[in-house]
Image: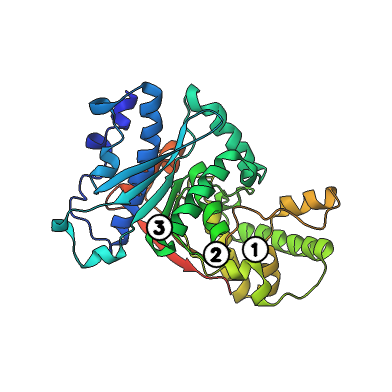
């Protein structure tokens, strides 16, 4: 039954009975659990579960968080996010608490249930069309993030999201980073809109396709924007590079696995002496550039999914199917086989 997949006592990370905020596994697991809490908040609303029947509270209360606000979509009144405040008892305070957040703003992904699917799916289409910034849901989310940062400062706020919610958190993080506020962010299975090159098993073929794509993309950039020189202090992509969100992807999840090749290809292009080409290509989407040519516009919309810097964690633990590879549950599972790399744009 579905409630068994929502019950913290059956599915949650009960092994985290003592939190070490300096431990990256603990931080990842807690962030993922808070995102799960937003999913269950909406499911509680749909199923009219209240009081002792509600399944959502243990997903944050187990880690000593309080729910201070639900983020509600103005189109269908569904809960799409939540703001949590960390309020540990004094007996749980230790040296690692300095690395804990004061507040976490979390966003859920798509729920395949009638009460919310229509609106969620329309947001998924906006992500595909690179138009999430134009939606009222994002406006609500962005205002909540801005207000919280203005109230307590960027060092006290974390962002977290899964799938569609990761796209929401990424866009909010990028937007506020441009104002000089860099939020710690945990982005689980964020969508990367691209041909599924990462699924090709032959390394030389993958590299060849990526190389060709980079050359074509760089060429279109020069054709549409010209060869004007921009200093690093004026380069938006370079300015954004100071923000290093944590990305969590699964290689068998085709919705997010392209992040693996995206960052690795950039590194490889630098190594073989084509870094200048890749620096143009890495911050531009081929699809958006083609559309700007069709529209005869000098400016393409800034691609949501492209990032200059990231701390990328890849879950190499075998997944049974796509549902498991894309699921939020994997990220609080103990003893995962993880590969972690820091990528910085230069």
Q: In the structure shown, which secondary structural element does the residue marked by tag 1 occupy?
A: loop
- What is the C-alpha distance between the residues marked 2 and 3? 29 Å
The single residue placed furthest to the left in the displayed view is 91
Q: How would you rate the neighbour count of disc 2 (Cα within 10 Å): few for under 14, some for 14-19, many for 20 or more?
A: some
Given this view, does label 3 or label 1 mark the residue nearer the observer? 3
Nearer to us in this view, 231 or 310: 231
Seen at 32% across and 32% down, the residue is 6
Query: Taking 63 as reference, is 188 left or right?
Result: right
In terms of secondary structure, where does tag 2 sit?
A: helix
Distance from Cα at disc 2 to Cα at disc 1:
11 Å
- The residue that mark 3 highlights is 157
Residue 21 in view, yes or no: yes
Q: Is there CB contact under 8 Å for labels 2 and 3?
A: no
Left or right: 47 as drawn, with respect to 301: left
Report whether residue 274 is seen.
no
Mark identifier at residue 190: none
Q: Residue at x 45, y 49 (%)?
A: 250
Q: Position of residue 70 (x, y in %)?
A: 41, 39
Name the N-terminal-most of marks 3 and 1: 3
Which residue is denoted by mark 2 in the rendering? 264
Percent of width and height locating residue 288? 73, 51
Image position of 84 with respect to 185: above or below: above
Q: Residues within 10 Å of mark 3 (few under 14, many from 20)?
A: many
Which residue carries the number 1 mark? 282
The reply to whether the C-beta atoms of the residues labelled 3 and 1 are less than 8 Å apart is no
Q: Residues within 10 Å of mark 1 (few under 14, many from 20)?
A: many
* Foreground label between 2 and 1: 1
Of labels 2 and 1, earlier in sequence is 2
């Amino acid at each position: 039954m579905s409630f068994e997949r929502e019950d913290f006592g059956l599915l949650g990370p009960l092994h985290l009975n003592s939190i070490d905020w300096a431990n990256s596994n603990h931080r990842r697991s807690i962030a993922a659990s808070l995102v799960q809490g937003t999913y269950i908040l909406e499911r509680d609303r749909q199923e009219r579960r209240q009081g002792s029947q509600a399944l959502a509270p243990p997903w944050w209360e187990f880690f000593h968080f309080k729910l201070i606000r639900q983020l509600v979509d103005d189109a269908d009144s569904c809960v799409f996010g939540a703001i949590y405040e960390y309020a540990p008892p004094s007996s749980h305070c230790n040296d690692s608490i300095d690395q804990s957040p004061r507040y976490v703003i979390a966003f859920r992904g798509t729920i395949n249930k009638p009460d919310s699917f229509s609106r969620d799916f329309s947001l998924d289409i906006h992500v595909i069309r690179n138009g999430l910034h134009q939606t009222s849901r994002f406006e609500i989310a962005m205002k909540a993030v801005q207000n919280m940062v203005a109230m307590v400062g960027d060092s006290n706020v974390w962002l977290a999201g899964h799938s569609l919610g990761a796209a929401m958190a990424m866009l909010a993080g990028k937007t506020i980073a441009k104002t000089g506020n860099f939020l710690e962010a945990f982005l689980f299975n964020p969508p990367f809109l691209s041909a599924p090159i990462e699924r090709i098993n032959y390394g030389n073929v993958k590299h060849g396709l990526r190389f060709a794509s980079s050359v074509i993309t760089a060429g279109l950039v020069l054709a549409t924007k010209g060869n004007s020189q921009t200093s690093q202090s004026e380069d938006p992509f370079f300015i954004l590079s100071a923000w290093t969100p944590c990305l969590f992807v699964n290689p068998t999840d085709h919705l997010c696995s392209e992040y693996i090749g995206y960052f690795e290809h950039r590194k490889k292009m630098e190594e073989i002496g084509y870094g200048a080409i890749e620096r143009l290509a890495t911050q531009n989407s081929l699809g958006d550039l083609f559309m700007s040519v069709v529209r005869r516009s000098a400016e393409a919309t800034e691609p949501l999914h492209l990032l200059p810097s990231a701390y990328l964690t890849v879950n190499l633990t075998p997944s049974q199917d796509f549902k498991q590879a894309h699921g939020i549950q994997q990220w609080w599972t103990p003893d995962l086989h993880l590969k972690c790399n820091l990528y910085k744009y230069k």
